[in-house]
Image (cartoon, rainbow, N blue to C red):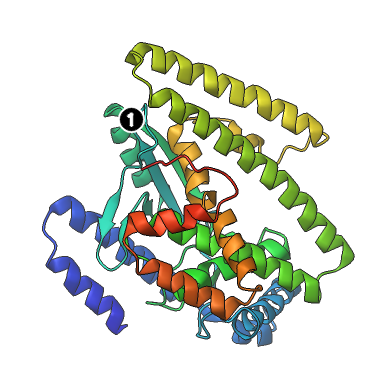
């Protein structure tokens, strides 16, 4: 509770009514999670709790122990509590870019620094901000987010927003968020998210190798194959658009080329979907708001994953050694840090910055 008081006092020192309003909703949202959180062990022992939820929470405690003992992630009370928020997402994040650029709009906060999204604990204010940004000419994407990390400031609970996924994906989400607690570098969203995503992938692979059924392993491999092909499609389109935006062509020509590129993206997705036997899992993503900001939301999490994967392999898949090296990279100036990661990539990365 002292941490809440600290944050409230911090807000008093930050001027501006809009800023106070934003941080007030953040505090209210976090406190709602705090109020709704119950120890998982108590819920498992509670005879009024339904059996399916008990089974899920029992498995999550096993995942939580695995995260610390095997993956060497923080050993604290995060993900030993459960909160039912009675809504589909915990936060809604707003991503924005200029119409002819992948330079992300950034928002800066105490403690965490600057990030390329702005999160809200309810959808309405996120959509309101998105509307304002669109009026200013930005490409905008609003994403519902099932979980997030407070970077160890609070005990992050398991949320109802996470439980509809397969167990391997729930495990990956917990590994991802704990990775943010392990290492977080201010003002570098691309670095932080790719690092956490790498830990997520590696963690799921090791979890399944130890506890996965043949079906769970096969299902995960299939989902990863589809995800890899989806990401490649998005990154290829992003790179093609970046080349368009970096030319000296008139703005009208760039906008026309942009429109054609997104039309081509849709066409290639339909071809990809056909190769998947009609799998519809990505239909909702493609249904609306195909723009720079939406592509950015994927690229931010994925661009440097191959680099982190390569680094882990160089270190004989030793996670403690990997964390040490990642922390060392985090101490470098941003451009030098990204340059070092780029050396590990199997391809030439097109900069968004």
Question: Is 349 placed left or right of 134 in the picture?
Answer: right
Instruction: Tell me where residue 264 appears, x and y as whole percent.
Output: 60, 21
- Residue 133 screen position, x and y as percent: 30, 34
Q: Position of residue 272 (x, y in %)?
A: 73, 32
Question: Do we see residue 79 in this rendering?
Answer: no
Determine whether, in the image, residue 143 is placed left or right of residue 214.
left
Q: Is residue 203 left or right of residue 297?
A: right
- Quarter-wise, where is residue 333 in the image? bottom left
Indicate the quadrant containing the N terminus: top left, top right, bottom left or bottom right: bottom left
- From this view, report whether residue 101 is shown above or below residue 249: below
Up/down of 141 relative to 71, above or below:
above
The answer to whether one can see residue 56 in this image is: yes
Circle 1 residue: 134
Quick check: 82 above or below 124?
below
At x 60%, y 86%, the residue is 42
Secondary element under disc 1, as helix, strand or loop, is helix
Q: Identify the residue at horizontal 72%, vertical 52% (top origin).
A: 224
Please tell me which residue is depicted at 31% across the width and 41% down the height of the picture.
Answer: 129
Foreground residue among 215 and 165: 215
Quadrant of the image containing the C terminus: top left
Answer few, some or many: residues within 10 Å of disc 1's Cα (few below 14, many 20 plus, some between 14 and 19). some
Left or right, residue 55 beside residue 23: right
**Residue depicted at 39% across the width and 59% down the height:** 337
Number of marks in the rendered image: 1
Q: Give whichever of 111, 334 is nearer the camera.
A: 334
């Amino acid at each position: 509770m002292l941490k809440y008081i600290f944050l409230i006092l911090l807000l008093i020192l930050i001027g501006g009514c809009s800023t106070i309003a934003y941080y007030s909703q953040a505090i209210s949202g976090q406190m709602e999670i705090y109020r709704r959180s119950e120890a998982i062990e108590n819920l498992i022992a509670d005879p009024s709790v339904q059996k399916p939820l008990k089974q899920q929470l029992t498995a999550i405690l096993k995942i939580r122990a695995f995260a610390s003992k095997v993956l060497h992630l923080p050993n604290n009370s995060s993900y030993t509590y459960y909160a039912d928020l009675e809504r589909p997402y915990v936060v809604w994040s707003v991503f924005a870019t200029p119409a002819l650029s992948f330079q992300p709009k950034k928002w800066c906060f105490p403690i965490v620094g600057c990030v390329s999204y702005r999160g809200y604990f309810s959808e309405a204010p996120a959509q309101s901000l998105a509307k304002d940004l669109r009026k200013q000419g930005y490409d905008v994407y609003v994403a519902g987010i099932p979980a997030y990390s407070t970077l160890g400031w609070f005990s992050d609970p398991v949320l109802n927003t996470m439980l509809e996924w397969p167990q391997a994906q729930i495990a990956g989400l917990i590994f991802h968020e704990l990775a943010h607690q392990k290492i977080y570098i201010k003002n570098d969203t691309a670095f932080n998210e790719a690092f956490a995503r790498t830990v997520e992938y590696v963690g799921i692979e090791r979890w399944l190798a130890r506890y996965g059924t043949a079906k769970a392993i096969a299902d995960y491999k299939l989902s990863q194959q589809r995800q890899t092909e989806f990401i490649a499609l998005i990154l290829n389109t992003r790179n093609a658009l970046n080349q368009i935006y970096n030319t000296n062509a008139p703005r009208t020509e760039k906008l026309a080329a942009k429109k054609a590129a997104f039309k081509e993206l849709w066409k290639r997705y339909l071809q990809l979907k056909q190769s998947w036997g009609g799998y519809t899992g990505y239909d909702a993503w493609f249904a609306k708001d195909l723009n720079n900001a939406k592509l950015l939301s994927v690229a931010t999490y994925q661009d440097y994953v191959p680099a982190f994967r390569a680094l882990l392999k160089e270190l004989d898949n030793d996670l403690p050694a990997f964390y040490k090296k990642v922390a060392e990279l985090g101490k470098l100036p941003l451009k030098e840090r990204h340059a070092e990661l780029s050396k590990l990539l199997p391809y030439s990365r097109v900069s968004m910055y």
